[in-house]
Amino acid sequence: SQQGEEDPQALSIQEGENATMNCSYKTSINNLQWYRQNSGRGLVHLILIRSNEREKHSGRLRVTLDTSKKSSSLLITASRAADTASYFCATDLTSGSRLTFGEGTQLTVNP
Amino acid sequence: KAGVTQTPRYLIKTRGQQVTLSCSPISGHRSVSWYQQTPGQGLQFLFEYFSETQRNKGNFPGRFSGRQFSNSRSEMNVSTLELGDSALYLCASSLARGGSNYGYTFGSGTRLTVV
């Protein structure tokens, strides 16, 4: 079963707008990671946030983590058509060395 | 430097056959993990290898097995294929066990179709 749930399942926006995706998880984590996947290809690592961090930035990406609510959000600012992809959150649990993925958000950025 | 290389890229097999998939991690990466991705179950962890030893295993039947060689290259094998084994199989490598502070680098995957 999936550790995380992502919301929304699908998101369609116009180029230049911001996109926000949310992820919730169930158990204590070591860190939470976000990945992007283009149409059936491999996953690309975007950003990692540790359990003792609350916010992290990387270029146009901003990730927040609220361990009390067991949730995270990924914000993509000034979106581009090339950002069209599926986005997954993945938790790395304190007990192991494996990623547990959410169901993903399909982002479509219209030019 | 070269990324994670998975071969073959596509594969079609018949029910009951067996298949072997290969993964070459990034040079210097010693941990290799395998994931199965299907539309119904999403991304699920299969197993992790580090220093030629299986360190962690997901909830998959014994038909799924793997190994890692001294050069960190890994193979996974699925025996007695079933239609439900049709999936994208992804390999991920990381510098250390768990990839905790470094994230994982994924290959492009092997698309297996069982007919």
Image (spheres, coloured by chain):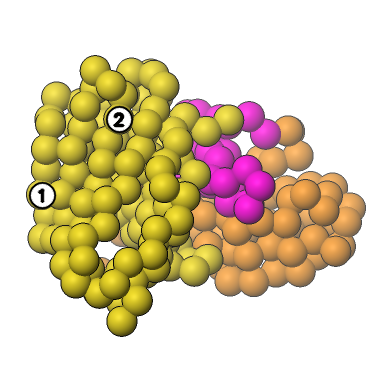
Chain colours: A yellow, B orange
- Three-letter code, disc 2: Ser
Secondary structure mostly taken by the magenta-highlighted segment of the chain: strand
Secondary structure under tag 1 reads: strand
* Residue A56 x/y as whole percent: 11, 43
Among the 4 quarters of the image, the one containing residue B103: top left
Question: Which residue sits at x=56%, y=67%?
Answer: B7
Question: Which residue sits at x=85%, y=64%?
Answer: B115
Q: Taking A104 as reference, is B6 above or below it?
A: below
Among the 4 quarters of the image, the one containing residue A63: top left
Question: Which residue sits at x=58%, y=71%?
Answer: B9
Return the residue nearer the eye: A35 or B76: A35
Q: Is residue A78 visible in this depiction of the protein?
A: yes
Q: Residues within 10 Å of mark 1 (few under 14, many from 20)?
A: some
Residue B36 magenta-drawn?
yes
| Residue position for label 2 | A71
| Residue position for label 1 | A57
Return the residue nearer the eye: B42 or B71: B42
Return the residue nearer the eye: A37 or B49: A37
